[in-house]
Image (cartoon, rainbow, N blue to C red):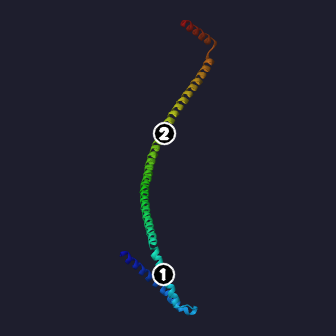
Amino acid sequence: MKKISGFKFQISNLLFTVYFSLFPVAVFAAEAGGEHGGSIMEWVWRIVNFAILVFILVKFLNKPLKNYLQQRKELIEKSIKEAQEAKELAMKALREVEERLKVKDKEVEDIISSAKVSGEKEKERLIQEGERLKVKILEQAKTNIEYEVKKAKEAIKAEAVDAAMQLAEEKIKAKITKDDHEKLFQESLKLISTKN
């Protein structure tokens, strides 16, 4: 019983739709009919034929049409659901990427600050090392200078002693006579003989 009343409802809906869809066409055709030789009855038969065609289509294609529309509806709903799931997955992935980017930004900031601190420490270490090397180099230079000065003084002393010896020798040679020379020779022989 319910199926019959549903069918009647569909038929009445269909006829109502056809009537209001084709009524303006029929009115327009009636007005223009005089010019082209058409009559209102001709249009009424066309409308009736169309209504019969629609009735046949609804009567015999009702179930396949319903099935097709139901399948189409389910396909669209499935597509919408899949699209929503894909959107949710994409949003989740986006949030994860944003979180990772925040973590990476923090890591980069930490690396930069760590590098700055490390750079400052290295700078201080290099300055201290430079100062230490400067003091060491100055001490080494001072030691080298003192050594060279001492060496130069000793060389000058040695030259002065040599020069004094030569001068003394020359003076002695100038003052020694043959007798003094003979006397020195004899004394040297005595010293040598006593040592043996």
Q: Is residue 116 left or right of residue 180?
A: left
Q: Nearer the viewer, residue 153 or 82?
A: 82
Residue 173 position by quadrant: top right
Pointers 2 and 1 in contact (C-beta within 8 Å): no
> Considering the numbered disc 1 on the image, is that residue within a helix, a strand or a loop?
helix
Residue at left offset 47%, top offset 43%: 126
Distance (Cα) linking label 2 and label 1: 112 Å
> Considering the numbered disc 2 on the image, is that residue within a helix, a strand or a loop?
helix
**Residue 129: x, y in percent?**
46, 41
Identify the image quadrant of the N terminus: bottom left
Vertical comparison of 174 with 64: above or below: above
Q: Which residue is mark 1?
A: 52
Residue at left offset 44%, top offset 63%: 82
**Residue 136: x, y in percent?**
48, 37
Q: Nearer the viewer, residue 49 or 43?
A: 49
Q: Which residue is mark 2?
A: 133
| Amino acid type indicated by mark 1 | Ile
Please tell me whether mark 2 or mark 1 is closer to you in this view.
1
Task: Please tell me which of labels 2 and 1 falls first in the chain.
Answer: 1
Q: Label 2: how many residues lie within 10 Å, few (<14), some (14-19) or many (20+)? A: few
Residue 186 position by quadrant: top right
Vertical comparison of 10 with 114: above or below: below
| Amino acid type indicated by mark 2 | Leu
Q: Is residue 185 left or right of residue 8?
A: right
Residue 75 position by quadrant: bottom left
Q: Residue furthest bottom?
A: 34
**Residue 83: x, y in percent?**
44, 64
